[in-house]
Amino acid sequence: MNGILRVEGLRKHFPVKGGLFQRRKGVVHAVDGVSFHVEEGETLGLVGESGCGKTTTARLVVRLLEPTSGQAYFMDKNIFELGGDELLRFRRQMQIVFQNPFASLNPRKSIRQILTTPLRIHHIVDDKEIEKEASTLLELVGLTPASLYLDRFPHEFSGGQRQRIGIARALTLRPKFVVADEPVSALDMSVRAQVLNLMKKLQRDLGLTYLFITHDLAVVRSLCNRVAVMYLGKIVELADTEQLFENVMHPYTKALLSSTPIPDPEATRGRSEIILEGDVPSAITPPPGCRFHTRCPIKKESCMSKEPELVDVGSGHKVACHTHS
């Protein structure tokens, strides 16, 4: 397994200490043995329902969190062993666009300060060119003329404009790799399309590689080359995008796809919606065996005791399911 980013057996467990209103103690298995790789220039989509571990995975690979165990290699260097100048260089190469741009932009700083501070810290351009570079970044994300925006503050912008500023900030250090953590989930449909088109254009023009995290499968199909599906801290299916949509194998992925609305009445004719029974199990006490077996419509006895491995069933299509092993 190769690629610009390679993740091997990544785990992140959060302790639950309990308290006056929280009697349960233990460990939250937020990410529990995740492995994947991302090729240079591609977009890997990471999908799953809320609480499955997508954002924790994102924060681990950009080293905003330290792992419980496992490794992540960026350009063949172990991210979690970097320190000093090497870590500083890594920060320039990999950046993140957060889900909520209003929360991730400092409300006390102007857009000029938000964009020029990283340029000064990392010495990306000469001091004389910093102001010009900030203007160029704003124009790159469609906020023109830049002079109208540089001295304004985050609360003076719409949600779509703030997300564009978040993307511009991620590009200040000229990274090779961008983690996009649900960058369009808080936007209305028209603005969402604009931001997605912008991200496609930037990828073509700047040669970017994306790890794109979302729960919207329609966005995945339009943007991603490959898709990894997560459930309760684990990847249960991974395949090329079209292959996944045309030949879905894992029952959880089938349920996700069946819940995706299709605007064409002809395409929905004869399509049956899969309604999963029960609730998502607790990440503190995940079920033994396959973690999906408590809701799976095709479970068998081995599913309740033996954990399935993520195995290649052909053409790079990987699935963690006893039915296909």
Image (spheres, rainbow, N blue to C red):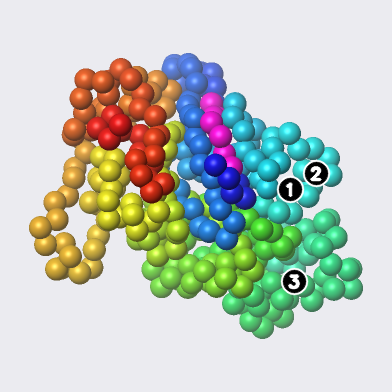
Q: Nearer the viewer, mark 3 or mark 2?
A: 2
Q: Is residue 12 magenta?
A: yes
Residue neighbourhood size for the residue with mark 2, other residues' Cα within 10 Å, grouped as few (<14), some (14–19), many (≥20): few
Say which residue appears at 26% left-offset and 20% top-offset.
302
Residue neighbourhood size for the residue with mark 3, other residues' Cα within 10 Å, grouped as few (<14), some (14–19), many (≥20): many
Say which residue appears at 64% left-offset and 75% top-offset.
140
How many marks the image carries: the answer is: 3
Kindly state the secondary structure of the residue where label 1 is placed: helix
Say which residue label 1 marks. Answer: 90
Asked if one can make out residue 214 in the rendered structure from this viewpoint, the answer is: no
In the rendered view of the protein, which quadrant contains the N terminus?
A: top right
Q: Position of residue 7 (x, y in %)?
A: 57, 39
Say which residue label 2 marks. Answer: 86
Kindly state the secondary structure of the residue where label 2 is placed: helix
Q: Main secondary structure of the magenta part?
A: strand
From what the image shows, is residue 322 above or below residue 148?
Answer: above
In the rendered view of the protein, which quadrant contains the C terminus?
A: top left
Say which residue label 3 marks. Answer: 134
**Residue type pointed to by label 2:** Glu
Quadrant of residue 123 in the image?
Answer: bottom right
The circle drawn on residue 157 is none
Which stretch is magenta?
A: 6-13
Q: Position of residue 214 (x, y in %)?
A: 44, 52
User: What's the distance in space between the residues labelled 2 and 1, CA to CA?
Assistant: 6 Å
